[in-house]
Image: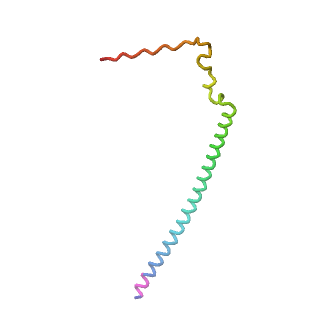
Amino acid sequence: MDRLNAKLYLQNCYIMKENERLRKKALLLNQENQALLTELKQRLAKTAAANTNSAKANGNAAAAGNRAAIPGLNAAAPGAHGGHEKKAAPKPKKAVAN
């Protein structure tokens, strides 16, 4: 009976030691997780702020003058020179071999 009691006592000590080791490991993993979560939130906030500032800058440029933002719209409309423009020659069709 004493022998069984000693064996169970040693098993209990081993289990408590392993439990403490796992508890410390879980604590460290939780701390690492919290640090990574904080870093992720900071990066997301920084990215969101940059996107907001970029969108505001783009919105201000567009509000200041859409023509300045898109240079192709500043070109003269076709036919604005009195209709004397040369038209491009049509492309020749490729011959198909039978």
Q: Residue furthest left?
A: 98
Residue depicted at 65% across the width and 46% down the height: 49
Percent across and percent down for residue 3 are 40, 85
Above or below: residue 44 compared with residue 8: above
Q: Residue furthest right?
A: 64
Q: Nearer the viewer, residue 73 or 47?
A: 73
Above or below: residue 82 compared with residue 53: above
Q: Nearer the viewer, residue 17 or 31?
A: 31
Residue depicted at 53% across the width and 65% down the height: 26
Residue 11: image quadrant is bottom left
What secondary structure is the stretch in magenta mostly built from?
A: helix
Above or below: residue 38 compared with residue 90: below
Percent across and percent down for residue 42 are 62, 52
Q: Give, as a single range, the part of the protein colored magenta.
A: 2-7
Percent across and percent down for residue 57 are 67, 38
Residue depicted at 62% across the width and 43% down the height: 51
Reply yes or no: does residue 33 show up in magenta.
no
Residue depicted at 62% across the width and 20% down the height: 76
Snapshot colouring? rainbow
